[in-house]
């Protein structure tokens, strides 16, 4: 959730004749869920604004002026800003990491206007550069008298636990007033977790030939950026692979933290028949080649699209997919026996007619490879079936000439 911290101040700048004695009416208001500790710190012989003591918790109706109105000559002390002899700082401590998106405030320099200045620090690290991110008029070549209200407004993209607005005084009679401090952002959440969604399947020859992948994210800080490994972006994308493909989703949150997840789109070729215009279904453990209009009825009774999957059990046979597939005209059929035994390996056409017996007899346990030469057969879908100890396994293969 976005949180906004607002230190509200109504700045009243009097006309030029009374600038050195300008009084500022201040008020404070907090919006959002954060309740940061806001402390005013000072060094040197500083006279803070009425009602605010150095190192005191920021009050509910008063605020602080920055710098000192009567520093005198030679006030400047070289070195880091914290080494200045007269400085004031609003120290904002969120006490937990805070994802900053923007910081803004108004400021004006009063008095002789020759040398007060300052910077913003995030976790005690200087933000920005001189003069782009400077606060104040320092040091000009001559006295300036510019009491106009100026806006310090910077977009942020990072985290911090503390924000310091530091002003120091390096010249006679100049001071800076800061007003309307607005800090935008949100508490830094736990790192994001990406989810690319469930695996999906495309059946070549039946049904939609594309699927929609939808990624989600939990944790992290919005907004999120979604990038997929196929160079597409966005939470949802459409893909149409022709082979089984994995897609990686990478989500990056506003704190520049990334998380990834992988989804697989499986591609199964269910085409069969003499003209490859029919569909393979698995019916009660047997692979059938049926007309496309008949598929819904089979699916309604629990049949599945595609050939029946081989099942491996102890003391039986494991039938592998032929290679290459499709083939012309020779392919290899491999099977693994868990034990010695009688086995039969037969090839059928798509009408269920036996066209070739490849193995019929006793085989020893282990891996076996059989070559099938279909030189005399026409193109189309065929099935090879192995039978051993009452277990029957069948797979399709495609002959393309």
Image (cartoon, grey):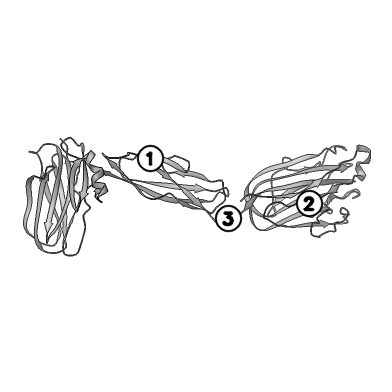
What residue sits 68% from the left and 52% below the top?
Answer: 32
Q: CA distance from mark 2 to mark 3?
A: 27 Å
**Is residue 378 visible to the viewer in this orientation of the structure?**
yes
Give the crowd class for mark 2: few <14, some 14-19, many >=20 residues within 10 Å.
Answer: some
What residue sits 13% from the left and 54% below the top?
Answer: 386
- Give the mark nearest the N terminus, 1 or 3: 3
What residue sits 87% from the left and 52% below the top?
Answer: 49
Residue at mark 3: 189
Q: CA distance from mark 1 to mark 3?
A: 32 Å
Disc 1 + disc 2, Cβ < 8 Å: no
Disc 2 + disc 3, Cβ < 8 Å: no
Query: As rendered, which of 388 and 146 lies closer to the eye?
Result: 388
User: In the orientation shown, which residue stands out farthest toward the right?
Assistant: 17
- Give the mark nearest the N terminus, 1 or 2: 2
Query: As rendered, which of 302 and 115 lies closer to the eye?
Result: 302
Please give the label number shown on residue 239: 1
Q: Secondary structure at mark 3?
A: loop
Q: Is residue 91 left or right of residue 329?
A: right
Residue 356, percent across and down?
A: 7, 46
Q: CA distance from mark 1 to mark 2?
A: 54 Å
Please give the label number shown on residue 28: 2
Query: As rendered, which of 305 and 68 lies closer to the eye?
Result: 305
Give the crowd class for mark 3: few <14, some 14-19, many >=20 residues within 10 Å.
Answer: some
Residue 64, percent across and down?
A: 83, 52
């Amino acid at each position: 959730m976005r949180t906004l911290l607002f230190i509200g101040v109504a700045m009243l700048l009097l006309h030029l004749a009374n600038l050195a004695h300008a009084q500022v009416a201040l008020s404070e208001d907090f919006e959002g869920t954060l309740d940061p500790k806001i402390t005013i710190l000072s060094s040197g012989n500083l006279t803070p604004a009425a009602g605010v003591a150095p190192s005191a918790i920021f009050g509910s109706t008063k605020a602080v002026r920055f710098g000192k109105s009567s520093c005198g000559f030679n006030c400047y002390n070289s070195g880091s800003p914290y080494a200045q002899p007269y400085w004031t700082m609003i120290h904002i401590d969120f006490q937990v990491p805070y994802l900053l998106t923007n910081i803004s405030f108004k400021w004006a320099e009063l008095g002789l206007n020759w040398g007060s200045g300052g910077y913003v620090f995030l976790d005690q690290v200087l933000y920005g550069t001189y003069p782009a991110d400077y606060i104040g008029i320092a040091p000009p070549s001559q006295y300036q008298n510019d009491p106009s209200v100026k806006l310090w407004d910077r977009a942020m993209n990072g985290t911090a636990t503390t924000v310091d607005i530091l002003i120091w005084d390096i010249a006679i009679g100049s001071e800076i007033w800061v007003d309307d401090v607005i800090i935008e952002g949100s508490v830094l959440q736990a790192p994001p977790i990406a989810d690319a969604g469930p695996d999906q399947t495309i059946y070549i020859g039946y049904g939609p030939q594309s699927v929609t992948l939808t990624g989600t994210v939990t944790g992290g800080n919005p907004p999120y950026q979604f990038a997929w490994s196929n160079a597409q972006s966005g939470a949802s994308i459409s893909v149409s692979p022709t082979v089984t493909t994995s897609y990686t989703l990478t989500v990056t949150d506003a704190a520049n933290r990334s998380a990834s997840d992988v989804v697989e789109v499986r591609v199964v070729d269910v085409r069969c028949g003499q003209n490859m215009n029919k569909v393979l279904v698995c019916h009660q453990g047997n692979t059938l080649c049926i007309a496309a209009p008949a598929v819904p009825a089979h699916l309604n009774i629990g049949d599945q699209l595609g050939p029946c999957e081989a099942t491996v059990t102890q003391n039986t046979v494991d039938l592998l997919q032929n290679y290459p597939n499709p083939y012309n005209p020779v392919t290899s059929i491999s099977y693994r026996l868990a034990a010695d035994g009688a086995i039969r390996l037969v090839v059928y056409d798509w009408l269920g007619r036996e066209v070739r017996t490849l193995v019929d007899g006793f085989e020893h346990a282990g891996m076996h490879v059989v070559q099938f030469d279909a030189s005399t057969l026409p193109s189309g879908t065929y099935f090879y079936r192995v039978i051993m100890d009452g277990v029957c396994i069948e797979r399709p293969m495609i002959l393309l000439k």
